[in-house]
Amino acid sequence: MTWSHFLPTFAGLFVVVMLRANATYWIGRGAAAGTRRWRGLEEEAASPTWRRARDLVNRWGPIAVVLCFLTWGVQTAVNATAGVTRMPLRRYLPAVTLGSVLWATLYGTVGLAAARAWIAAAARSPVAATVIAVLLVAVVVTLVLRRRTKRT
């Protein structure tokens, strides 16, 4: 991949992830402002993912925001929790910017390389590419279901 391909891809991915992460932060802040008026909200009602994200943000703050961009399944919860816990913008904005740079770089390089490899494989053998995709989805679904069963 050349710079002429990488830079526009990186820029597009960076803008998308910055918009999404900041929108999630502000939705969290808005939700917190609305729910603070209510009394008797049960902490136990929060999902395990939500509690883990809140604990991570409370413990590690901006570092958690940066690192959540290198994970699957926690990014939205961490950014929303940063909003709900009203992380100051002077701490949140640098962290979300760095995290977005990491995310855009990762997906702009490794993600696009994987997509190109997949397209090349599908062009050579559409049947084999379909079988591999179905097997991959089956493995992911199995792992997710096993993980959920262990929690309950």
Image (cartoon, helix red, strand yellow):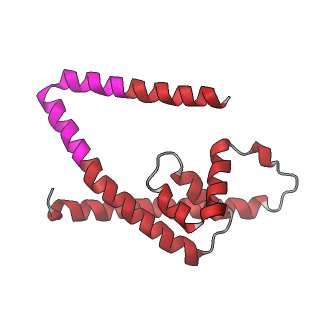
Position of the C terminus, as image quadrant, is: top right
Locate residue 148, reporting x and y percent.
59, 30
* Residue with the most extreme right position: 40
Q: Is residue 140 above or below residue 71?
A: above
Q: Residue furthest left?
A: 124
Which residue is painted at 29% across and 62% down in the image? 10
Residue sticking out furthest to the bottom? 90
Which of 39 and 71 lies nearest the eye of the viewer? 71
3 vs 16, nearest the viewer: 3
Q: How many marks on residues?
A: 0
Question: Is 138 within the magenta?
Answer: no
Give, as a single range, the part of the protein colored magenta: 113-136
Residue 87 visible within the image? yes
Q: From this viewpoint, which residue is outermost toward the front?
A: 59
Res 16 quadrant in image: bottom left
- Check if residue 129 falls in the magenta segment: yes
Corner quadrant of residue 127: top left
Residue 49 drawn at (x, y percent): 62, 45
Magenta: main secondary structure: helix
Residue under the point 55% across and 26% down: 146
Quadrant position of the N terminus in the picture: bottom left
Q: Is residue 42 left or right of residue 136?
A: right
Q: Position of residue 120 (x, y in %)?
A: 15, 37
Q: Residue at x 45, y 56 (%)?
A: 69
Image location (x, y in percent) of residue 97: 44, 69
Left or right of 123? Residue 16 is right
Does residue 13 appear in the picture of this structure?
A: no
Residue at position x 50%, y 69% in the image: 95
